[in-house]
Image (cartoon, rainbow, N blue to C red):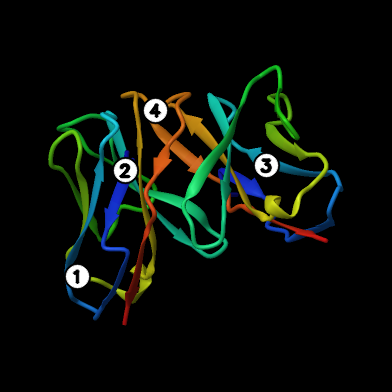
Amino acid sequence: NAGVTQTPKFQVLKTGQSMTLQCAQDMNHNSMYWYRQDPGMGLRLIYYSASEGTTDKGEVPNGYNVSRLNKREFSLRLESAAPSQTSVYFCASTRGVSGGNQPQHFGDGTRLSIL
Amino acid sequence: RKEVEQDPGPFNVPEGATVAFNCTYSNSASQSFFWYRQDCRKEPKLLMSVYSSGNEDGRFTAQLNRASQYISLLIRDSKLSDSATYLCAVFNAGNMLTFGGGTRLMVKP
């Protein structure tokens, strides 16, 4: 059982390039999340999808777009990468629509560097 | 002021010591609370949920103080393998889980 799978694991981009980070979960979870983690900042929520067909902004959505392709997959897109987006990106999922008391299951992370 | 705050540490303790971390939150309407453990260059993993009455899992005890708006994590008889960063997380209405910046623990022989 793979859980939450993120691809790629590492990526280096030039400023202005675009790319999509992929995330898939095989736990039949309803809610999915994208976070970024910077040193000393903890995890900050970029976007989330409470259920298939819905997406909402988190704490730091600027410069990103998301797509909830189906129940399993939730992708994060950087249209025009900036050095400030250099970070480690984590995808997570929870079973319930509301999140609530349920723990979040995380992928391994994508380490993204923008030059 | 950050919504969820933690002392970044590091906390350097000898094996066998007892160590406690606190995490304060600003939203009095917060509903659910968690402690996550994150090893270096790895993803966060749920350590334990925090219940109103306090809860224990082996050497780990979590407590919630709603009046003072903080949660705590107590680790007894520290092991070398406990060395990690401990993140607290607070869930508010609006389906968002907010994380603290993490507290780094280093257990030394």
Q: Crowdedness of circle 2 by 10 Å Cα count: few (<14), some, many (20+)?
A: few
Distance between mark 3 and mark 1 Cα atoms: 36 Å
Lower position in the chain sequence, tag 1 or tag 2:
2
Tell me the tag on residue A2. Answer: 2
Distance between mark 2 and mark 4 Cα atoms: 21 Å
Q: Nearer the viewer, mark 2 or mark 4?
A: 2
A65 left or right of B39 in image: left
Please, is residue B65 above or below residue B4 in the view? above
Q: Nearer the viewer, mark 3 or mark 2?
A: 2
Q: In the structure shown, which secondary structural element does the residue marked by tag 2 occupy?
A: loop
Residue B30 visible (yes or no): no
Residue that numbered label 1 is attached to: A80
- Quick check: do tags 2 and 4 share a chain? yes
Residue A66 image position (x, y, % from top left): 20, 49
Residue B52 image position (x, y, % from top left): 66, 19
Distance between mark 4 and mark 1 Cα atoms: 31 Å
Distance between mark 4 and mark 3 Cα atoms: 21 Å
Subunit of label 1: A
